[in-house]
Image (spheres, grey):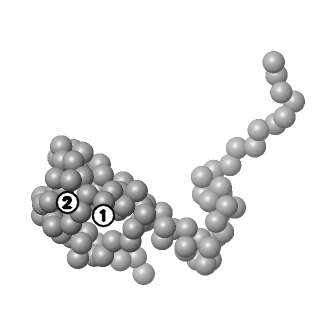
Amino acid sequence: MKSDKTTKLVSWDDHIDEKHGKIGTPTRDKYEGEFEAFKIGVLIQEARKRKNLTQEELALKVGTTKNYISRIENNASDIRLSTLMRIIREGLDGQVSLIFDL
């Protein structure tokens, strides 16, 4: 069955602009900050799984709790830079690289 409705496709950038405001606005800055925190959690989770570690094993390696690792992976907790570096270096045998875009 065909629909008479015309689907309007928009680019991802236009969608984000409409939903969260243009780049540089307070609402867009808030969204982008939260998205970066979400990405950190996902990256840690993916790296942990590639290393075949459980949350408990990772937590033991870095001296924290399974609950804290879970909260980071699920974006329910802010993470200190020192803790992030410890997780990457000691827990996942990786390196941390930071880029500042001013």
Is residue 41 visible to us here?
no
- Outermost residue toward the bottom in this view: 102
Q: Secondary structure at mark 1?
A: helix
What is the three-letter code of the residue carrying label 2?
Answer: Ala
Q: Who is closer to the viewer here, 61 or 33?
A: 61
Tell me the crowding category of disc 2: few under 14, some 14 to 19, or many 20 or more residues within 10 angstroms, Cα based. some
- Outermost residue toward the right in this view: 4
User: Quadrant of residue 82 in the image?
Assistant: bottom left
Q: Are marks 1 and 2 in contact (CB under 8 Å)?
A: yes
Residue positioned 55% across, 74% down in the render: 29
Which residue is label 1 attached to?
68
x, y percent for residue 1: 81, 18
Q: Is residue 51 left or right of residue 8?
A: left
Tell me the crowding category of disc 1: few under 14, some 14 to 19, or many 20 or more residues within 10 angstroms, Cα based. some
x, y percent for residue 75: 42, 61
Residue positioned 21% across, 70% down in the render: 85
**With respect to residue 5, does 51 lie above or below?**
below
Q: Earlier along the polypeptide chain: callout 1 or callout 2?
A: 2
x, y percent for residue 69: 29, 60
**With respect to residue 66, does 96 lie above or below?**
below
Which residue is label 2 attached to?
59
